[in-house]
Amino acid sequence: MKYLDEYRDERIARALAAEIVQRTTQPWVLMEICGGQTHTIMRYGIDELLPRGIELVHGPGCPVCVTPLETVDKAIELSLRPEVILVSYGDMLRVPGSRSDLFRAKAQGADVRIAYSPTEAVKIARANPDRKVVFLAIGFETTAPANAMAAWQAKRDDLNNFSMLVSHVLVPPAIRALMVSQTNRVQGFIAPGHVCTVMGCKEYESLVRDFRVPIVVGGFEPVDILEAVLMLIRQLEAGEAKLENQYVRSVSYAGNVPAQQIMSEVFEVADQKWRGIGPIPQSGLRLREEYAAFDADRVFDLGEISVDEPAECISAQVLQGLKKPPDCPVFGMRCTPENPLGAPMVSTEGACAAYYHYRRHMVAS
Amino acid sequence: MSTKTEVDIKFDLSCPAPLPAKDTVLLGHGSGGKLSAELIRDVFLHTLQNPVLARLDDQAIVNVNGQRLAISTDSFVVKPLFFPGGDIGSLAVHGTVNDLAMGGATPLFLSAAFIIEEGFSMDELRQVVNSMQRAAAAAGVQVVTGDTKVVERGKGDGVFINTTGIGLVPDGVDLSADRARPGDKVLLSGSIGEHGIAILAQREGLEFETQIKSDSAALHTLVADMLGVTREIRCMRDPTRGGVSSTLNEIAEQSRVGIEVEERALPIHEQVRGACELLGLDPLYVANEGKLIAIVAPEAADALLQAMRRHRLGAEAQIIGTVKKENPGLVTMRTPFGTTRIVDMLAGDQLPRIC
């Protein structure tokens, strides 16, 4: 298949891996930000092709994993109200809140529907004027423009039965938080290609400058990841710290400007809590005041949902790249994708789930 | 922004409490994945246990007056009722015929039970029954008994169909999922993922350049051709819901062996690959309704492959893997990069990813 097969070509991959081996003279710790990239690394065994000294640690870029427990609990509570139709991206349905998940809510009679695009939720609202449609608007910058478009359409059409439960996170503040953390080990980042398709590369310049850390915007296929690693190694071995773009077939320096415009028309930057990590200042998006009528947090009286979470898993260390999933004493034992104890086991893109699905045999042996 | 002005973020440990005991039936319990297996083990097998049921094959094989009789039953709740390549009527015949065929049985008779929702179109019902008759005639089986129930509007989804089939197992044929042995070869009769993607595309109103058709077909003549070549076939399964991965995992589990699949050998048509990429699905977990997987003795593999390829429904057959003694209970895949990974059984249904 065009635009896929060439990026999964084993000869190209092996040639890139050979050049990485040749250029690596000392150990380096690299982090891929996006869960989609983690998934590719595990699925194709990219880390096995790299020299021993290069350690890939897995970043916090799984949108499903980092959505706060409170947001999941709110979505479940809303879905159980008879007047509500809760519309969500598919992979949020299995995410456990503190007591239940949306699949279980559905089994109890909640009207929970899966959408591929948030504008489908707007259509559902138009078709069901007597019901209240809530879209669970989560994700990174990748999903923000489409989510913003849904709110924009609802406002344009003066819909009074559509709202969004928003939990949006931003990548650059998370990288900044990792870099200022005293326990940081990461020496180079593969930035998320889909986020940068929307936002461009430009907002990563200041991170490169402030922390003298190389950042390469990378794609999601095996050849993309290997090329991005090679670009990082070339910089690190030469003592350089630059912003480079490996994913040129999708990412420009300025990004998708109309998408950024609709995002900033509808959303504003706000403090945000990340599941498994904690609060990071100015790391999320919330609906602007002009869109208050479409903000489920304000439309519905949800009260204060706060959740006590037992500190059992090591997700914070995993999401910071301090530990690998198999280092966790409950990995694959009490914590599995069917019964996840922590955020990174929840979605297939989470680091723990990726290890569980693709690498258990090696962990065991 | 200078880093000096920023606060060092405290990374709190935050983990959700585990979910309470499973007290409700979820849609995932019908997915063919781990939840289905748990449901069967904990609720049905636990209570109804007997040695025939405990084999957990697609059909039961019982001895009646010296004749080995295969019995199988299947319910069909597909939505939409009509889809490219078939409909609920033909599917209800093919599904049960195939479950009998996977035991090596010659299918003979079917029963058909209809649960119809009040208000369902009589015309559509006739179309379904006509399609059922055509499929049964083509497969050489007869629908010899049946039942109809009508439920109130809103209590069904148009029509649900259950079919039960019986067939005879020829002497010397002994197929079961616990018979795979290290060294055996894994054969797949053709390209995967077509039924599931055809249904999904129709349900979601997705359009592709070329229409993807369900592969729904009766496989018993292919099975007969294979058994005509050799009896060195250990087991056969049709990878329906849960796809190839669930079927291989079941065999690995029941035979306590590892199965290693060559990713490169998997036949997947371009349109299905494209649709799966677009939808964020893995074709290994997508349902098939006209494909079979056979675990065969290594020395018989090539002759069987040739026999399969001579049959219309096996033209694209491939040897896709090998049974291993390592990693018992697990299915692994050799990637084109020479690395290996697990092909896991999913908990429930495959969910489209957010991005």
Image (cartoon, coloured by chain):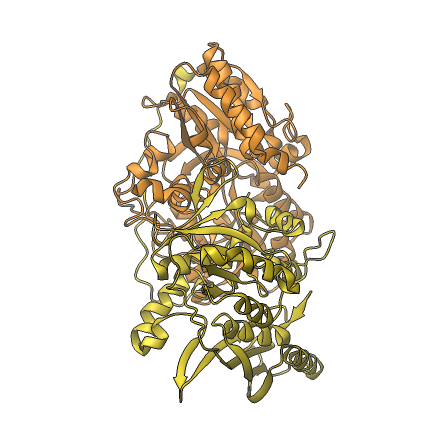
Can you give x and y, in whole percent of width and height, for residue B4 in the image?
Answer: 39, 15
Rendered position, B267 above or below B132: above
Residue displayed at 52% across by 72% down? B101
Relative horizontal placement of residue B153, taking residue A187 as reference (left or right): right
Relative horizontal placement of residue B13, taking residue A126 as reference (left or right): left
- Would you say residue B177 is visible in this rendering? yes
In front of the other: B197 or B245: B245
Q: Which chain is yellow?
A: B
Residue displayed at 66% across by 64% down? B312
Hey, which quadrant is residue B345 in on the image?
A: bottom left
In front of the other: A133 or B295: B295
- Would you say residue B1 is visible in this rendering? no
Can you give x and y, in whole percent of width and height, for residue A229 in the image?
Answer: 50, 24
Hey, which quadrant is residue A104 in on the image?
A: bottom left
In front of the other: B162 or B302: B302
Residue displayed at 49% across by 72% down? B104
Q: Colour of chain A?
A: orange
In front of the other: A287 or A65: A65
Rendered position, B129 above or below B310: below
